[in-house]
Image (tube, rainbow, N blue to C red):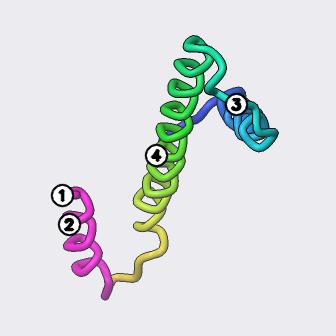
Amino acid sequence: MVDIPNFLSSFINEFQEVKQLGISKNTDKKIIKIFEKLEEVERTYRNAMLLKKVSNFINSISEQTIDSQAGLMKVLLSLLLLL
């Protein structure tokens, strides 16, 4: 199970609002570094959300699969794990 803290979601939303306000990151070297780190956090957050969706899908697929699909699903899951 992938768990992402709520404060991180709120933090990312607030950062996106700051970017939408048009606050320039070109004013100070410290601000530039902060924006770069925040953009890295934002990318990591998006990847974590994708991982959470894939994880939930894989964890629940056995409940949704009928017997005739089981062999095909094993092949597809093994291919997914290779990515």
Residue 82 in the magenta stretch? The answer is: yes
Instruction: Name the mark nearer the viewer: 2 or 4.
Output: 4
Packing grade of label 4 (10 A; few <14, some 14-19, many >=20) is few
What predominant SS class does the magenta segment belong to?
helix
Labelled pair 1, 2 in contact (Cβ < 8 Å): yes
The mark that comes first in sequence, 1 or 4, is 4
Q: CA distance from mark 2 to mark 4?
A: 19 Å
Residue identifier under label 1: 82
Residue identifier under label 3: 24
Along the viewing direction, whichever of 51 and 42 lies nearer the viewer: 42
- Secondary structure at badge 3 equals loop
Amino acid type, mark 4: Asn
Packing grade of label 3 (10 A; few <14, some 14-19, many >=20) is few
Packing grade of label 1 (10 A; few <14, some 14-19, many >=20) is few
Amino acid type, mark 2: Leu
Residue drawn at point x = 66 percent, y = 20 percent: 27
Compared to 14, does 37 lie above or below? above
Q: CA distance from mark 3 to mark 2?
A: 44 Å
Residue identifier under label 2: 79
Residue at the far front in the pictured view: 27
- Secondary structure at badge 1 equals helix
- In the image, taking residue 38 as reference, residue 72 lies left or right, namely left
The quadrant of the picture occupied by the C terminus is bottom left
Q: Which disc number belongs to residue 47? A: 4
Amino acid type, mark 1: Leu
The mark that comes first in sequence, 3 or 2, is 3
Q: What range is drawn magenta here?
A: 68-83
The mark that comes first in sequence, 2 or 4, is 4
Residue drawn at point x = 48 percent, y = 53 percent: 50
Q: Indicate the quadrant where residue 30 lies.
A: top right
Residue drawn at point x = 50 percent, y = 55 percent: 56
